[in-house]
Amino acid sequence: MLPLLLILPQLLVSLLFFFWPAAQAIYQSAYIPDPFGLKTQFVGWENFEFLFGDRYYLESFKTTAIFSILVTVLSMSIALWLAVMADRIIKGSGVYRTLLVWPYAVAPAVAGILWLFMFSPGIGLITWYLDQIGVDWNHSLNSGQATGLVVVASAWGRISYNFLFFLAGLQAVPRSVIEAAAIDGARYWRRFWTIVFPLLSPTTFFLLVVNVVYAFFETFGVIHMITAGGPQQATTTLVYKVYADGFVGQDLGSSAAQSVVLLLVVGLLTIIQFKFIERRVHY
Amino acid sequence: MGTVFGTGSGMVEKRGKALWLTHVCMIIAIAFICFPIYLAFVASSVQQSELVKPPMPLLPGSHLFENYKEALFTGINAPVWKMLMNSMIMGMGIAIGKIIISLLSAFAIVYFRFPFRGVFFWLIFLTLMLPVEVRIVPTYEVVANFGMLNSYSGLILPLVASATATFLFRQFYMTVPDELAEAARIDGARPMRFFFDILLPMSRTNIAALFVILFIYGWNQYLWPLLITTDPEMNTIVMGIKQMIPSGDDLRNWPVIMATALLAMLPPVLVVVVMQNLFIKGLVDTEK
Amino acid sequence: MATVSLKSLKKSYGRDEVLHGIDIDIADREFIVVVGPSGCGKSTLLRMIAGLETVTSGDVLINDENVNQHEPMDRNIAMVFQNYALYPHMTVYNNMAYSLKIAGTPKAEIKERVERAAQLLQLTEYLQRRPRQLSGGQRQRVAMGRAIVRKPAVFLFDEPLSNLDAKLRVQMRLEIRKLQRELGVTAVYVTHDQVEAMTLGDRLVVLNDGYLEQFGSPIELYQRPATLFVARFIGSPAMNIFDGMADGTQVTLDGGVRIDTGIAASGRVKVGVRPEHFVADTNGAFKVNTSMLEQLGSNTLVHGTLAGASGAGAAEIVVSLPGIHTEAMVGEGLSVAPSELHLFDPDGKRIDG
């Protein structure tokens, strides 16, 4: 009796706010509400067929993929570079760490507004500088610029996190291995690419997965704040589209079908993450 | 031997210059990373009129105090102090709620054998696959049916179940030697007494580290409050910023918006900086 | 104060039976050591007395009361664990006082009992420390203190000394024995170390693979091992075992050596001789081909094979001779008094004359 009581709160919340809604999503994905919202009609796979026939939906897959890759690569490479430098500095690396960790606490949406302000078409400082060198910046019209800005703002907020894990990974590389390589005559960068970086690969793989998941979900705030998915849905990711179709467009059947697709994607990512983490334990 | 010494002294010599270069690179990089925040700070200290004629000034102005005062007590849709309070309640509620729920359920899973234990464990595990973003519309409907729109319980409850925290505590409990529970049993402690007297005090550091992470997670929520708080009085600060931006470009009160943005990041940043070691422990633990 | 009886006690995990019916009667104030190799079920036996494992069948009686269904705390027992199991976040004082607090003992009495136990164990100056600030021996004492303050009827020890270094182990062994006498409690002590078992126990329980091999005093076990297993397990270096063929009171060992045993038997048998029972004797039946000498000062261990047997089948032999011997004793004779010979049937059961 006691153990059931102990587990009950978590179970209740999970059932009410996780499983019931998820089941609803699956159920609704097979129905279309009539125009008055009074009745629903069973349509089977139709919502899904419609979804995968929708050019915008397929586009949002591509957008999400490009977006995830760019954010992951950008934030991880900057973080790795910073971590390598911090690792070389023995004195004062604590100070640098403090200066680099706090952006972690900045909400993605807040990061969005900071970057929006700098690149604001009317008054942004960077926009003005760009104008001076002849670049016309308007991310609300130019989809490439919009994607770029959203990517940079998202990656910016992610650097701290990656930096911390890379730094921890670097500091866990045994000194003796590096010294052995030095005695073998390898220079710094050669040592880095042939010894340190391979030893860091568990951390790198782990961060790859985590950052892709992050780019999928947590960047909603950045996108909503800066571009609201535009221009012409150029920055509409899968998550953004569920929101836009479900809440702004009130297209519940389609939104539910999208939720189900997302569910599968997250499931896949989670499995990859766990498979990988399990392997990581053996390192 | 000669080679070893040769390489060694070469390294040391190079290190002097390389170290300087490293410091310089590091400082430049940090300056770049901090620049957006610095700029926001400058914008929050000048008047709107100074911002609308680009380029904006690069040094702080003299209106810092009044901009923050305006933001905190007048705001645009709702006074910011109100939104700060909402965020505080949401952040604390989620962090404390998740920790309590997880401490208890992990205790049940690790220390008891009971029917359907495996099923429950998998149910909790599966919630990992259901982030709020995946189930927004139906979750919204559930919350609306309970009449929890524009309420703190609506803000907190749907985010309060956390498989991550449960796993973390499960992991920690499993490192506690069985003999400790047995010793307590022989000493006459019933299960809940063991939980409060032994397990809870032993989990202190883990709880604190997790609290830092979960508080930031709760404070920084965006999508969920955006959906369920239509009343500006119930807005959290992070999503409230968006509500401050009207559709027309010209009307934006940037100094107040930027002041709000800085206020929005201040509490979680303080938590991270002040509790840096706990924060890093929490980060590493939750991702393990 | 307390007697403990186990009546055909069995334990199974699923279909896997790990204890096959153990019967033991422990007298009041007796110090019982349960000894056996790892995995023999000795810890399970102890944990069933403690109430940490359920009883599959049979009975555990403490003071003639069946306690099968009692919670550990209601059995009037205390247990000292191998890894001490001290509460890491509590001071030494609170570790010792915890059970009394739960029982609702008045504060003044708790203080008095903890302080008395601390004094007994020389822990008084450490009462406000936490376990991690203590050495291994001190932690061990705290674990005992925690058991003492409850004034239990039965003390249970689960390999309490195995985490200590050799020197400390000897010292703590003496202290445990002294303490048990002073407090006048019944004790059940589990170990895999036969020296610990021999020195501590009034009586020993030898377990092997879930079966009770023998229950008796250390001297009984040494002089009259009931089974081949006990014969090999008790005594160091271990008893020599030779295969042979019995005919009346004579046995012909496989190497051809003929000895008089004084015990009537027939067919295949095993003959056991303790290394220290060989006596140098030029007319002795045993002849050794020495391969190695180990000098221990007080005595010398001679390792070799039994001469007479040819080739690879030659039986290994270990002989312990008093004093210092430096020469290899190839072909020298050894004899054994018939009373020091042990005879076992092919199933490993002792054959008595």
Image (cartoon, coloured by chain):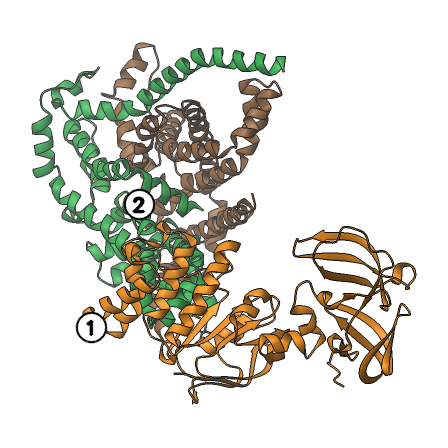
Chain colours: A brown, B green, C orange
Give x and y (percent) for residue B226: 25, 46
Q: Nearer the viewer, residue B63 or A58?
A: B63
Image position of A211 with respect to C86: above or below: above
**Residue drawn at (37%, 49%), measured in percent from left and top?**
B133
Q: Position of C117 compared to C256: left or right?
A: left
In the image, is A10 to the left or to the right of A76? left
Residue under pointer 2: B217
Q: Is residue C155 visible?
A: yes
Left or right: B200 in relation to C302:
left
Crowd tier of the residue under label 2, counting other residues whose Cα lies within 10 Å: few below 14, some 14–19, many 20 or above = some
Task: Residue type at mark 1: give it.
Answer: Pro
Question: Percent from the top left, x then y, of residue C200?
Answer: 51, 70
Which residue corresponds to mark 1? C106
Name the residue rendered at 28%, 22% in the picture. Answer: B35
Q: In the rendering, at what x and y percent does residue C72 appear? A: 40, 76
Relative to A80, A115 lies left or right: left
Q: The residue tagged with tag 2: helix, strand or loop? A: helix
Q: Position of residue A69 (x, y in %)?
A: 48, 33
- The amino acid type found where label 2 is placed reads Tyr
In the rendering, which numbered label is found on residue A93? none
**Of C252 and C71, which appears nearest the observer?**
C252
Tell me the residue at 80%/62% (across/down): C316
Q: Secondary structure at mark 1?
A: loop
- Mark 1 nearby-residue class (10 Å; few <14, some 14–19, many ≥20): few
Mark toward the viewer: 1 or 2 = 1
Between C26 and C179, the one nearer to me in the picture: C179
